Image (cartoon, rainbow, N blue to C red):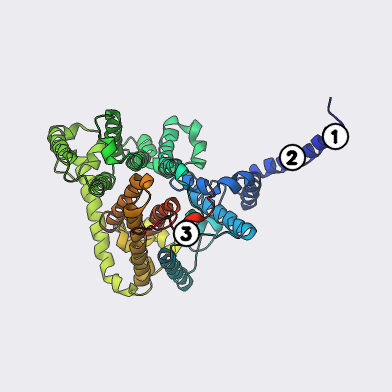
Amino acid sequence: MSSPVSLPKSLLIYAITIPVALVLGYFLTTPGDPVSSFLFLVVACVLSTPFLLRSHHIFLVFSWNASICVFFLPGQPLLWMLVVLISLAFTVVNHILYREAMFISVPSVTRTLLFLALVVFLTAKLYGGIGLKSMGSTSYGGKKYFYVFSAIAGYFALTSAVIPLHRARSAVALFFLSGSTAVISHLVALGGPAFYFLFRFFPASLALSQVTAEMTGLSLARLLGVSMACTAIFCYMLAHYGIRNIFTSQHPFRAAVFLSIGIASTFGGFRSALVWLILLFMVQFILEGLVRTRLCVFFVGMAILGGVLLLPFSRHLPLQVQRSVSFLPVEVDPSIQYDTQASTEFRLEMWKVLLPELPNYLVFGKGYTLDPTDLYLTQESERRGFASSYEGSLEAGDYHSGPLSIYVPLGGLGSLAFVLFLITGGRVLLRNYRHGPPELKNVNTLLFALFLTRVLSFLFIFGAFATELYLFTGLIGLSVALNGGSHGPGEEAPMSAQLSPVV
């Protein structure tokens, strides 16, 4: 029997929770309604406040590379964008209550990011503002501004707390392995319509090629999510073990898993992905000082043997794999050869058309704002054969080139700000790689190698500034949080490392 004291408490709990549940149930019947989405977000934040107060920073680390959508918000942003705002809000509250420093101080990176944010803000102000289709705007393109500002804010959110050494290993695992969630989209598509409701949580765009191939009977289904998941595991193994400890006679299973992950990544069907992994491995190999060791001879021999084995069997590989290795001097299926040549010509023709316009953007670019009417007319012209295949991408600002993706929208000033950020951020990663704590040697080596690889890929292979900036700010922000700032020769941990860790 309930005591006289517990009975009123139970009634009070029921009196509050039952009406709240009924109201939420009513609003969830219209999930697309902005009021319903806002109410759901408010209730979710209130209920999760105790967890977020303690763990918002480590939750941000997990969400950074996770392929998870916030389906109840307009535009369905990725999870890390929402967690950035939440983490910054709790950081400000923590600063007000306890008067602790808000961010780990690395002035050079802070100044260049604020300069970049100012250029982006002025560009938006001068050229059409920030128009969001998901919010009913008459102009499009604002989502790219949101990506850029979120990436910049994300750096400050990541550097709002020091990650203690005893938690560094788990933080690095969460940061990289969360990227393996990209494969879930393919599993949902494989499960069929009964599981399609899960696309609310996991981006359906990752499985678009797979679903299209199943519906149309096409033989080439590029598994982007598989490639992304393999890349995430590939990076984690390099960060956790390093090349030296992966390819060791004491642990042959590690090398087998590592090589299998690299091979599985080719099922994405993207040449750039395989080139990117090879480049990352080579940079890491050099940074670990393995060039003059037996491992170098071993890998040269493996490359020669792999090439000899690949030549006679390349035509018999799955089409996705053939497309991934098509940049090598091997024979591939004629349809794959035609597809890759068309892709290359598509880019070259677009860049040739864009070249005469480049002098117009010496100071400010044209911004990200799009006229939906122009975009619609261009797409319809493409469908009817009155426009070239690249004109839709040109109108949408998808230039398939890293330098053009920042120079055309943000101009010379934006390009300068980004270059300065890369220089200052790269210097922080270099200092931590050289002088960071011995316990973080493998992690700091991978972070610096990954940064250099992303820069080279962005400049010479493929890049999209707006949607890839967070990859750069994330690497630098994680390095600062793990190392407590930027280490110099002969220095102890920076003063910022004395901050109370909040993870």
46 w.r.t. 153: above or below: above
Q: Position of residue 155 (x, y in %)?
A: 46, 57
Give the farthest residue toward the top.
1
Say whether residue 30 is visible: no
Q: Amino acid at mark 2?
A: Thr
Q: Amino acid at mark 3?
A: Met
Q: Secondary structure at mark 3?
A: helix
Circle nearer the viewer, 2 or 3: 3
Front-most of 396 and 232?
Answer: 232
Nearest to N terminus: mark 3 or mark 1: 1
Residue appearing at x 45%, y 31% in the figure: 192
Nearer mark to the viewer, of 3 and 1: 3
Q: Residue 5: which numbered mark, if any? A: 1
Q: Look at mark 3 in the image and give the residue it sits on.
A: 495
Task: Name the quadrant containing residue 414.
Answer: bottom left
Q: Nearer the viewer, residue 25 or 387?
A: 25
Q: Residue at x 46, y 42 (%)?
A: 166
* CA distance separating discs 3 and 1: 52 Å
Q: Earlier in the sequence, mark 2 or mark 3?
A: 2
**Left or right of 331, for residue 492:** right
The tag on residue 17 is: 2
Name the residue furthest right.
4
> Which quarter of the figure is the N terminus placed in?
top right
